[in-house]
Image (spheres, grey):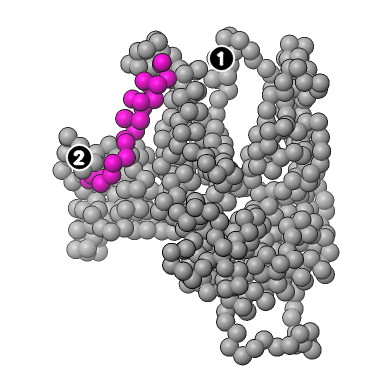
Amino acid sequence: MVLVVEPSPPMQPASPPGLPPRARHRRLLRLQIHSVVGTISPFVDMRPPPAIDSTARPPASMVLPTDAALHHLHSTDAAGPLPCADPVHTGAREVDPTFNINRWMNRSKGQEREVFDELVGVAEMKVAVERTGGIVVLAESFGHSVFKESLQRIFQSSDNDLGLSFNGIFEINCSKDVKIQGIIGPCTSLEKKSPLSSDTVVGQGSTSAWKMCGLDRKTSICLVFDIAKKDGPDAISQSTSNQFYFQFLTYYQHHEGQMRLRATTLSRRWVAGSGGVQDLIDGFDQEAAAAVMARLVSFKMEAEADFDPIRWLDRALISMCSKFGDYQKETPSSFSLSPRLSIFPQFMFNLRRSQFVQVFNNSPDETAYFRMMLNRENVANAVVMIQPSLISYSFQSGPEPVLLDVTAIAADRILLLDSYFTIVIFHGITIAQWRKAGYQDQQGHEAFAQLLKAPREETDSIIKERFPVPRLVVCDQYGSQARFLLAKLNPSVTYNSDNPPPPGGDVIFTDDVSFEVFMDHLQRLAVQ
């Protein structure tokens, strides 16, 4: 739908001269809300994308007080909500006090935001955006490449449909042996009461149907189930039937207007006793489990006031290793994990250090943005967010993946780090000196020119396939922006290590434990 706005008699007095940008933004967004909710048919989709910067926050909302001591940071949020801040959907209500998520959802409209600066209220608008299936692009300014390329990407669909579907409803049918705890993802509960609902609620729960106002081919949701208690009135003894099933029904509106239904039915079998342990191990997906743990810990950090994410992750990992590991009691050196489980501790180590758990260096808006993207992306992308990929380029070999460790740094090597939100091209000190000397432009140094070109080509291919577009950082060893790489590496060599780094290597100035120390503690606790 294309809306053409022409001059017409004013419905209200003109804006006063010199109206500040934040007040103009408030009036614009209020007009969008009333236009969509009051005039647009529930069967016609519309996705208004207002752009917000740090000057657009209405002072009356008091979400960000002028007192510097109350700036909108995680440290102040931990002490309690800011004055006048609504913990549910302040960002929408500060524009229109009558805003209601259910009214917006019933019109199947996605709340989208293109946001600039770090203190514009994304954390307060997270609920409205996520429950209506909207998208947020967080950038530094209107002219930043992240915003410009992401905005262009929305309209680069070969099918002329923007790759979007609308007005979706997701339903679950399953055996009575299992109960539905809820969904973590871009949806909202339709409050459809069902005997399949568990008493324990995770995310959007207490229902068997959810509304998904906007979805695409990459939209991914996390479903959490519980095993029904055997003494419950609806429980069925698992011994009477070795099978249980799930059926997922997805209704959605195609861009051509037709309503479509996709049904997915799958069956699984119960395993019990010590003989079923190997069956559980064989069916374990380490990457999917890491993505689920990331969503769960992010949800608990927002929902539970006194939640300790590090302790919760450590306990879950120790419990899993103690149950499924091979070891002799009280002998840490004998501990080992099946290849189907061996990478999971590494995922948990990096999740503990990720932006989803360690929020100290990020604003609440940045943290909300990271978690919104985690909650809608598929497993492959979620794993990159948790444990970035690292590729090495050198004269000795072609592009090859290397360990996410500080020992990967070398003077004659280029590293390409992909952490999903940021892509870093890191030049070793020797490579950086040659580049600054212009050797790549001189005859006879074509190999060096190709070495510099290879990571840029790989970066372009990654950016082309990703939305929102990631930030690109090109840096040199010992440069200020090298911190974007060092913050993601395993600190196996630090400033107080006994063994110095090899020539051309680097150290990390941190007191964080390395992965080796982490595994030593894990093995010691798992075999107790």
Q: Which residue is mark 1?
A: 277
Q: Report the magenta residues as a range.
A: 506-528
The number of discs equals 2
For marks 1 and 2, the one nearer the N-term is 1
Q: Position of residue 431 (x, y in %)?
A: 23, 54
Query: From the viewer's perspective, is the residue at label 1 or at label 2 nearer?
Result: 2
* Distance from Cα at disc 1 to Cα at disc 2: 42 Å
Q: Position of residue 516 (x, y in %)?
A: 32, 30
Q: Secondary structure at mark 2?
A: loop
Residue at x-position 43% and y-position 67%: 68
Residue at x-position 72% and y-position 74%: 31
Local packing at callout 2 (Cα closer than 10 Å; few below 14, some 14-19, many 20+) is few
Q: Along the line of sight, which residue is nearer the eye, 366 or 480?
A: 366
* Quadrant containing the C terminus in the rendered view: top left
Residue at x-position 72% and y-position 23%: 228
- Residue 328 visible at all: yes
Which of the 4 image quadrants contains residue 85? Answer: bottom right
Q: Along the line of sight, which residue is nearer the eye, 67 or 209?
A: 67
Relative height, residue 174 to residue 99 (above, below) = above
Q: Secondary structure at mark 1?
A: helix
